[in-house]
Image: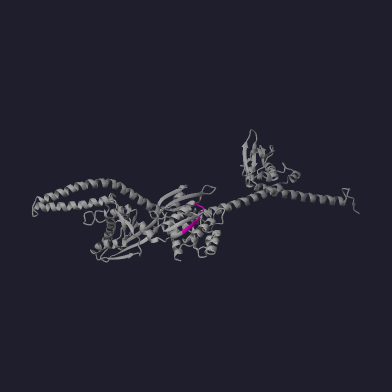
Amino acid sequence: MDDKIETVEVDIRGQVCPATLLVALKHVNEHGSNIRNGSMKLVLKTDNRDATVTIPDSAVNMGYSVNVEKKDNFYSISIGALDAR
Amino acid sequence: MRDSNPDNPSSDSYQRLLAENRELRAKYENTVAYLRKKIDQLLLVMGTLPLKPEELDDSTLIELDPIGIIAGSFGQVLNHLHTTNDSLQIARDEIKAIFDSAGIGILVLDSDMKVVSYNKKQQDLFKAGAEVVTGQKCYSIMCGADEMPSVCTFRRVMKQKRPVHISNWNFNDRLYDVAGTPIFDKHGDVARVVLAYMDITDRKRIEEELSRVNKFEAAGIFAGGIAHDFNNLLTSILGNISLAKTLVSPKDRIAEKLNTAESASLKAKELTHKLLTVAGVAEPQKKNISVAGLIKDTTALTASFSSAVCEYRMQDGLWQISADEAQLRQVIQNIVVNAFESVSDKGVIRIKAENVSVVEGGSLPLVAGHYVKISIEDNGCGISEENLPKIFDPYFTTKGMSSRKGRGLGLAAAFSIVMSHSGFITMDSTVGVGTVCTVYLPAAYKDRDEQTKVGGRALVMDDDEIVREVAGDMLALIGFDVSFALKSDELMKIYMEAAASGKPFDIVIMDVNIPDDGGAEKAISSLRAFNPAARAVVSSGNPKDKIMTNFEEYGFSGALAKPFKMSEITALVKKLSAA
């Protein structure tokens, strides 16, 4: 199933709050319908630790599933449809 | 004249433009400040930090459009909330359906022990007349107390903060298994306590009966062995006493001693016989017996020694039972003797016998079927709650072993005999009010069948072989000659052939749904066209089917919901035969 899901990656490293959240939400709004129907997954790369809380909180409230992974020098926040959790 | 050239910095026009420019700049700055303030408010709601002017200049701010972004996100949050609310509503409806249909009482309390909600079954546990229950303290509407009782499931759940289970909780003379489960709020405090009450009174009663039966079986093996050996020894003792008596003169003092020894040995023989009965060693020699006469005969002898009054209420058409007459007399006598001994001279003994049908899954530990119920009720001293469970135990007596009255085997023997007849005996009593002993004995099959015989010819249409077989067997039992059809065309063919041969069917039973066929609806129209007076019954597993609920409109004389019991099919065909 996963190979049919398009992944859109957005690199917001270097940005701090509240810009990280606003940029992330802008992309979530833009791709909302595709993420919701399961055809797309949005992956945000950030090095701002606060964003690992604010972005998932907002995305969950909007009805998405969120997964945060710690990579070598950044965090990968993956936002997908609820069913595709 | 003042210079009005706007290019001249000292001119009035130039100065006015400067003032307007300052005013506009101030307005712009106020607007941006207002926007930043509102954006900060929105960001705060989103759980993030306010904007820093040094990081985001005014033109970038407008370009980024934070209000638009947040508004878009809020739109999605609201949509998600609506979806969640819809799901919650369905979940709530599901819980309510489970709640209301549960066979156990469920009570939800808040942390102050006030009733939040309860299901229908739980209403039985509330105090009579308790109308407004929600918001009331649990102990007030259930226990009728002014404060929380010392033994309380709610108290334990609140203290232990984990699920609690209490077995055999005695409430209003019934036994309950109570399960208390806490529901925690997000701070980890108990917000609600869910209490589930399962009534185990009937289950306990059946368990006690089973345990008593097991006790008897164990005692039976032991007592049976001893009683046999003891009987052999008694035979030798009694024989030798008889022989010894022939060797002395009847007037001799030795003869007197031998007579006393003989009398005691005969009593010992009687006791052995009772032991054998209790042990179930004495197999009943069954034959069909009319209970009413046997009860009156047996009671009359005991009643003649008492001034207490004996009243009889025997149902007309009482079924016969298949029983060992001598053993049945012993059962009645043992119960009646106890009843007479418990009443004063002005006592009244009421003996009732009636036909009853026991259904499967009822509270009585009996196989479903027809029984004769005999109840012997007295208004005597009663039996204490403590002694009642032991009343059928061998060697249990309240009369004192040294007295002439008993050895505690009478009711034990009655119990053993009733059990060996596949019946059931039970005793209910209230001290100072009286006692009622109830005996159930299975009705004799042959006798019962004759009473329910209807007879005739029946035609059954059903595509299910098992249904055909069961309906056929049931109808055959009440005297019908049964034929079968799988479809409506076949039904008509058989029906018309039978009519032509002079052996018409008295009753036709047909299934509503037959695959690839019009079923009962098709069959009834053909049947009515052929014989408007035909007696037809529609049958379905769905009692709400339109043909079942309006069977007369469709031309049927009756409706039979599947699965049907013997009693139901019998009652229906009897009713139709009589019509």
How many numbered marks, from 0 up? 0
The percent coordinates of residue B159 (x first, y second) are: 45, 49
The coloring applied to the image is: one colour
Q: Can residue B461 be seen?
A: yes
Q: Which of B388 and B33 is in front in this view?
A: B388
Find residue B129 and report its horizontal and vertical position in percent.
45, 63
Residue B561 as seen in the image, left or right of residue B38:
left
Q: In this view, does B197 lie above or below B432?
A: above
Q: Residue B548 versus residue B213: which sits nearer the camera?
A: B548
Tell me if residue B539 can be seen.
no
Q: Which of B1 and B77 is in front in this view?
A: B77
Above or below, comparing residue B374 to residue A19 in the picture: below
At 65% from the left edge and 33% from the top edge, which residue is drawn?
A73
Residue B521 is inside the magenta segment: no
Q: What residue is at 37 percent from the left and 59 percent from the top?
A: B448
Residue at 21%, 51% in the rendered image? B269
Image quarter of the N terminus of chain B: bottom right
In the image as oriented, which residue stretches furthest toward the top? A72
Relative to B188, B373 lies left or right? left
Closer to us: B147 or B31: B147
- Where is residue B342 shown, x and y percent of the image? 27, 61
Image: magenta residue range = B458-464
Relative side of B182 to B83, left or right: left
B547 relative to B288 in the view: left or right: right
Q: In this view, does B211 lie above or below B510?
A: above
Q: Furthest residue to the front?
A: B501
Query: Measured from the top left, where is residue B164 in percent x and y?
Result: 45, 48
Quarter assignment of residue B378: bottom left
Residue A7: quadrant of the picture:
top right
